[in-house]
């Protein structure tokens, strides 16, 4: 098996003469045996590898093997055979080669111009050869019987990936399947060394990067790929307005994951440009010109997923992202000891928030308008303020009600924030119902379609050119850990965590959450009273907030009554827990 230089990702310059090489996270080829082999015609074998991966095929023919064979690679099946005319950007390719006895050969298709012949595309290392996403291969002309020992898929994954780093299981088997689909989607899309937007373009985008980062951390603790993607995008920013704010989100997530002030400090000054302050008017709200209103202010993607959004120069979604970015920049400035700058960001955020509420909120309906100068109120204009904590307490019920009645009126990208909004407002049951809804706008639909990597859109009919290997559709990989299990970092580098489960209708959930200090293991049961068992690694303390039901008026820690305060729908333990602990309501 060829092993690439572990720190080298080659771009088009080294293979196609289009761009220079850059450093990226390490990627390696992993040999994977077939899950099944069957003969589908007199001279054709069908091989199923069980799941899609980006890779190619290594063949080890028998000594008597000779002659020409044809290999077909596919992501989709039709009538028991590889679909050779799949829809959209779903992949099919073929390659012909000649066997010469027992000599090992690699079968791979020619490079696809759609994701290699444009300067922005990320190419995989030359040592890996051409890779494409496939689950099935058909081999025509194989000499004799095709056996398991004759072939391996060489699948490209991050070399630091640990399949045992995380797990999740709960009382709903469909959610278990959804988590595994999303976990594997993150693993399978590490093939390029930086986060890319699937196979059609193989280009990093800022929003994709942030969603990938959240789910990567929930499944494997290594921050290198997120960091390399950040550095890539600082040099090669993309066009959507709100994608700029996502770079601040990525930097803050790295800070909470690692506590690495040196990494943050080296990038802090460049992050200031992502606030887009040149577009701010006197009251702090960002203003879009005509070109930005017509193209750059993205709100959601594809355009059909915007719930009828009305674009105006002062755009509610754009300004919600701006406010969140200001708050996070204040946090990062404080982390670096830049108190004057932190105070300035906080003051800007407060001024802009007042204008945001006065200009964009409709008190008569209790919802946010899409922008200044329109009465239209989309789900997006309300879900983002709710997710970002911008809605005043007295209006949260009305905004949540509006968001809830719109069901899933957004894309798989915005669903990350929609579900965060539901969980943050204690609407756990609705969040889980949306994940598992019996419609074609849910992860239930993806699971039941048979896909093994999440899609770019909810269904082919919503985006006919979508690809089937897009990790921004894998939000449950982080949502089920961060909300259902309820574990998030509360201090940089995970020195302190919050444990705040959101059980909804589930009877139990358990899992392992990776951190740089070691895994957190957790199990909770919600029948009939709530009981939590947790093991924290050395150096991590946990702030525990248990869901409070109508039953149970005392909190016990390791069998002894402990001090706790009830606030709303939560019991807050007064003291942090460490090591192994059991907490229960009685």
Image: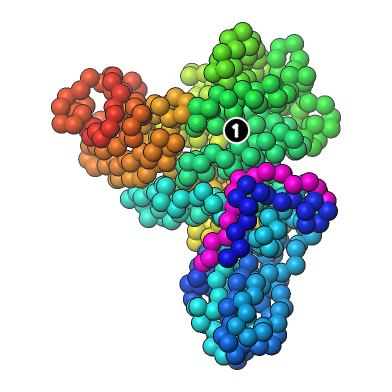
Q: Position of residue 444 (x, y in %)?
A: 49, 55
Q: Is residue 255 above or below residue 103?
A: above
Front one among 407 and 28 = 28
At a point 60% along the width and 83% down the height, the residue shown is 102
Q: Quadrant of the C terminus?
A: top left
Q: Magenta span has 22?
A: yes
Give the image quarter of residue 156: bottom right
**Residue 526: horizontal and vertical position, in percent?**
27, 40
Would you say residue 407 is visible in this rendering? no
Can residue 226 be seen by looking at this rendering?
yes
Which residue lies at the image location 54% right of the left edge and 79% below the top edge? Answer: 150
Residue 489, quarter of picture: top left
| Left or right of 369 on screen, residue 516 | left
In this rendering, is residue 519 above or below 577? below
The secondary structure type at the circle numbered 1 is: helix
Q: Which stretch appears magenta? A: 18-32
Viewer-nearest residue: 306 or 92: 92
Residue at the left extreme of this rendering: 560
Horizontal and vertical percent for residue 98?
A: 70, 82
Above or below 275: residue 509:
below
**In the depicted structure, whether residue 98 falls above or below residue 24:** below
| Residue for point 54% across, 52% down | 159
Q: Which residue is mark 1?
A: 250
Residue appearing at x 48%, y 19% in the figure: 393
């Amino acid at each position: 098996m060829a092993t690439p230089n572990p720190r080298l990702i080659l771009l088009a310059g080294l293979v196609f003469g289009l761009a220079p090489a850059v450093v990226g996270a390490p990627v390696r080829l992993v040999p994977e045996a077939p899950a099944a082999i069957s003969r589908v015609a007199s001279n054709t074998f069908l091989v199923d590898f069980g799941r899609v991966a980006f890779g190619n095929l290594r063949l080890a023919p028998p000594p008597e093997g000779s002659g020409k064979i044809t290999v077909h690679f596919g992501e989709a099946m039709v009538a028991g055979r590889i679909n050779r005319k799949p829809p959209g950007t779903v992949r099919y390719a073929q390659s012909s080669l000649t066997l010469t006895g027992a000599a090992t050969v690699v079968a791979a298709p020619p490079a696809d111009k759609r994701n290699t012949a444009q300067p922005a595309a990320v190419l995989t290392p030359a040592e890996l050869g051409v890779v494409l996403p496939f689950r099935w291969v058909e081999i025509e002309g194989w000499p004799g019987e095709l056996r398991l020992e004759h072939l391996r898929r060489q699948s490209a994954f991050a070399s630091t990936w640990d399949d045992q780093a995380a797990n999740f299981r709960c009382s709903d088997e469909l959610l278990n399947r959804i988590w595994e689909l999303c976990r594997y989607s993150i693993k399978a899309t590490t093939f390029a060394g930086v986060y890319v937007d699937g196979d059609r373009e193989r280009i990093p985008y800022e929003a994709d990067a942030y969603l990938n980062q959240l789910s990567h951390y929930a499944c494997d603790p290594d921050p290198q790929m997120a960091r390399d993607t950040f550095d890539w995008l600082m040099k090669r920013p993309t066009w959507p307005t709100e994608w700029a704010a996502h770079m601040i989100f990525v930097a803050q997530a790295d800070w909470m994951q690692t506590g690495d002030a040196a990494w943050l400090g080296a990038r802090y000054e460049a992050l200031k440009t992502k606030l887009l302050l040149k577009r701010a008017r006197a009251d702090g709200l960002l203003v879009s010109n005509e070109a930005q209103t017509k193209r750059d202010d993205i709100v959601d993607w594809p355009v059909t997923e915007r719930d009828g959004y009305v674009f105006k120069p002062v755009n509610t979604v754009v300004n919600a992202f701006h406010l969140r970015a200001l708050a996070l920049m204040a946090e990062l400035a404080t982390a670096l000891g830049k108190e004057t700058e932190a105070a300035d960001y906080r003051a800007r955020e407060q001024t802009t928030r007042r204008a945001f509420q006065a200009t964009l909120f409709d008190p008569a309906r209790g919802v946010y308008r899409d922008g200044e100068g329109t009465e239209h109120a989309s789900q997006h204009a309300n879900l983002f303020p709710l997710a970002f904590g911008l809605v005043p307490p007295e209006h949260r019920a009305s905004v949540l009600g509006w968001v809830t009645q719109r069901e899933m009126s957004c894309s798989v990208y915005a669903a990350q924030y929609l579900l965060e909004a539901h969980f943050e407002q204690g609407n756990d049951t609705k969040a889980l119902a949306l994940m598992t809804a019996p419609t074609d706008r849910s992860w239930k639909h993806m699971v039941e379609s048979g896909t093994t990597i999440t899609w770019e859109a909810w269904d082919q009919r919503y985006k006919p050119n979508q690809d089937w290997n897009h990790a921004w559709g894998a939000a449950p990989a982080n949502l089920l850990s961060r909300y259902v299990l309820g574990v998030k970092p509360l201090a940089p580098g995970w020195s302190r965590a919050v444990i705040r489960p959101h059980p909804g209708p589930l009877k139990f959930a358990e899992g392992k959450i990776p951190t740089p200090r070691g895994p957190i293991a957790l199990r909770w049961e919600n029948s009939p009273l709530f009981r939590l068992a947790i093991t924290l690694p050395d150096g991590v303390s946990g702030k525990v907030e248990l869901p409070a039901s109508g039953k149970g008026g005392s909190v016990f820690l390791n069998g002894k009554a402990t001090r706790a305060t009830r606030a709303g729908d939560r019991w807050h333990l007064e003291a942090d827990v460490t090591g192994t602990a059991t907490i229960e309501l009685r």
